[in-house]
Image (tube, rainbow, N blue to C red):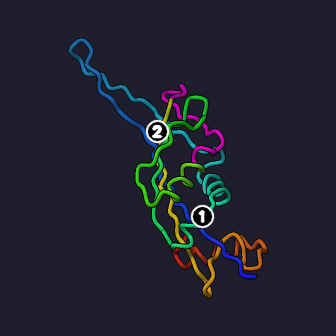
Amino acid sequence: MNRFFTLAIFSLFLLMGVTTDVYAQDNKKKKKEDVIVMAQFKGGQEALVDYLLQNTRYPAEAMRDEITGEVIVEFVVERNGMITNAKIVKSVAPSLDQEALRVVTNMPNWEPGTKNGLRMRSQLTIPINFKVIREHGKYVDPETMDDGIQKKSKRKRKLKRKGML
């Protein structure tokens, strides 16, 4: 029996930074630096990639029609770490958009962002790339071999060398 496996490759770009505002006070300019730390997935970016790889399912219709592309999802991390207001910023196809939204809205709570040590809401954007990879005429998931046996690290290294991850 033939099995079809799929791959969703994710690229993440989370912005972090420090902003500087200049305030006028009694005709003097006073420089005040606000230290802003953006929200982050618990465990960091690598843990986020692992979560997305484990929880995203390539829609059967998109796989069948070999629909690929980058879906960009924007969302807010609330002060308590919950994900809210997820929306598609760049669409590819309804089935891929729906899957990207499902995975983002079901993410566990994040570490909230802070401004000068106080928790704040943070708006983030994640691009999620969907690609169909074939080997020997079969669709392949990098997490498994064709026989379903887990071979994660070896398969991931091979895909990284080929520039697919």
Relative horizontal placement of residue 146, taking residue 38 as reference (left or right) = right
Q: How many marks?
A: 2
Amino acid bearing label 2: Gln
Task: Say which quarter of the image contains residue 18.
Answer: top left
Residue ID for mark 2 = 123
Residue ID for mark 1 = 58
Q: What is the crowding at mark 1: few (fewer than 14 residues within 10 Å), some, or many (at least 20)? A: many
Looking at the picture, tell me which residue is in the foreground, 72 or 61. 61
* In magenta segment, residue 116: yes
Q: Residue furthest top?
A: 26
Stretch in magenta: 104-120
Q: Give the CA separation, mark 1 to mark 2.
A: 26 Å
User: Which comes sooner in the sequence, label 1 or label 2?
Assistant: 1
Q: What residue sits 59% from the left and 63% below the top?
A: 59
Q: Is residue 133 above or below residue 74?
A: below
Relative horizontal placement of residue 81, taking residue 33 as reference (left or right) = right
Report x, y in % for residue 57: 63, 61
